[in-house]
Image (spheres, rainbow, N blue to C red):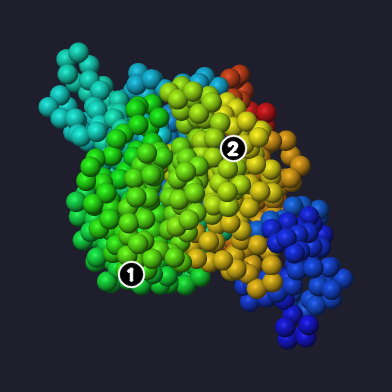
Amino acid sequence: MSQDAAPQIILHNGKITTMDRANPAPEAVAVTDGRFSAVGAARDILPAAGPATRIIDLAGRRMIPGLIDNHIHIIRGGLNYSMELRWDGVRSLSDAMAMLRAQVAATPPPQWVRVVGGFTEHQFAEKRLPTLEEINEAAPDTPVFILHLYDRALLNGAALRAVGYDRTTPDPPGGEIRRDPAGNPTGLLLARPNASILYATLARGPKLPFDHQLISTRHFMRDLNRLGVTSAIDAGGGFQNYPDDYAVIERLAADGELTVRIAYNLFTQKPKQEKEDFLRWTSGARYGQGDDYFRLNGAGEMLVYSAADFEDFRVERPEMPPEMEPELEQVVRILAQNRWPWRLHATYDETISRALDVFEKVDREIPLDGLHWIFDHAETVSDRSLERIARLGGGVAVQHRMAFQGEYFVERYGAAAAERTPPVARMLEMGVKVSAGTDATRVASYNPWVALSWLVTGRTIGGLRITPQRNALDRETALGLLTDRVPWFSNEEGRKGRIAVGQYADLAVLDRDYFSVPGEEIQDIASMLTILGGRVVHGAGDFAALTPPLPPVMPDWSPVRRFGGYQDRAAKRGTAAFARCCDSACGVHGHAHAGAWAASTPAGADRGFWGALGCSCWAF
């Protein structure tokens, strides 16, 4: 290698997992012009360093390809991240409620406190949600909205007043506003089974201004980078309108400020107007348009509303209406004619088999060969449907929703049915194209290590074993579902997913060894160093100095300022920490953290000063 071709970065002295069977465990890696330029022996790569080459000693740490989430709502999540209090990872309801109280004290009117998915009651030691009485006591005047999975939302009295729900408000189709004996809303909203009531209510809250949404999205991507994520497929989403809600991500892409590569799908906007949406989009946009960081990935996950089988396992499986097939056929024909791949949300095999009837009918006239179309979720897909999917050249994108809803599935369908829900091992055995992701942020958490933990251990985050060992995956196979198997789903095979010469230099150096930690600790893994296209996008510990700066989180009352995003179980962060340490008085400030956080730092008052900046009790 000549001096002119000296790499920008060399990483060595670690345990490197490449996901490349031909070169599985090299000693060193070189990066040149955003791609891996050498992967092999240290004695061959280290001498190629030039004066400007950054040499990174991994000190024995595990390095893997950057993780790729096959289904996440990153665009919508970024717009709202700075407004949301995340209970992801919090392991006691008392800690969660302490965080809520602190955020209520910091949130000015007319803003809301929002906990929007990413958790389940089963993760809490108390194994329950807060009551409406507890929420109203914690927030008598500040609107509070708490979304739990796809099944319910909890609103306090102030939130009910803010959205205007009263005894005259009718129940929407597929939803229920729970009422007291006098007919007044209690604050409990139920999906029966349509989650539209939950999302429509959330949409009534205040929104961030454009400049704050830019910063919010950057901080969301940084938390994904902290977890080792370097790429994602955005699956559109309800109340995510194209092109209006894409202006922020398009600005960041144009300015070179994306720290996650995004392939995005277009999600139909309104029921009974799906055909018009896709006619307009396929005529005005080209599949694959964009670049290596931001590109159009086709249609879905919603193609037609009549095919949406909402996955609330607390209620009976919904039966799709008879208009599903003709409406779906219209859209699939448009997509096939324009060679646009698609993804279709489908929880139950009954929906999948009916959709396959449509796909096979279209295929007879417009061959689907070469179109990378997929089913999303597919929790109860049958072997027969998997055979049909494979024959038509499709794939299945699974997510870790059962890690959050497994207890409810077992309660309704039994433990035996949950043993292969979804049947990931069987998909691999049958040679079906399959990969994994999270479906974050409104249901499951965006932490990919929770997904890996579920795939390997077969346990929910509440600890219930739902997948027997014979159906669980070994760690390398599971890791492949979030690395080298995902690029097929965005038509990027050979470009990313492995540490191999010529592929994008996307990687993560882990804070503990994924291949040796106990299974229950997999979900606690984070990245100490994340590199995207040869540039550092996150660093911690020994690599913290390499982290590029971010603008401060805005607005100044944002929950992210106090708590960050995903709550590490082992870390003492934010009010979850003071809720534990303040069980015994330290005698300094009366533990008035919440009130102090809501104000500017009062240098002349001991109680408020230490409430804002901390005290000796934080060390415990």
Separation of residues labelled 1 and 2 (CA atoms): 37 Å
Q: Is residue 385 left or right of residue 13?
A: left
Q: Amino acid at mark 1?
A: Asn
Q: Are marks 1 and 2 in contact (CB under 8 Å)?
A: no
Q: Residue at (66%, 33%) from the top-left corner?
A: 469
**Outermost residue toward the left in this view:** 168
- Residues packed near mark 1 inside 10 Å, few (<14), some (14 to 19) or many (20 plus): some
Q: Comparing marks 1 and 2, which lies closer to the viewer?
A: 1
Which label is found at residue 338? 1
Q: Is residue 173 left or right of residue 403?
A: left
237, 251: nearer the viewer: 237
Q: Is residue 3 above or below residue 46?
A: below
Residue located beneath label 2 in the image: 454
Q: Is residue 232 above or below residue 351?
A: below
Q: Residue at (69%, 49%) from the top-left corner?
A: 476
Query: Which quadrant would the N terminus be assigned to in this image?
Result: bottom right
> Residue 608's spot in the image, x, y percent?
50, 33
Q: Amino acid at mark 2?
A: Trp
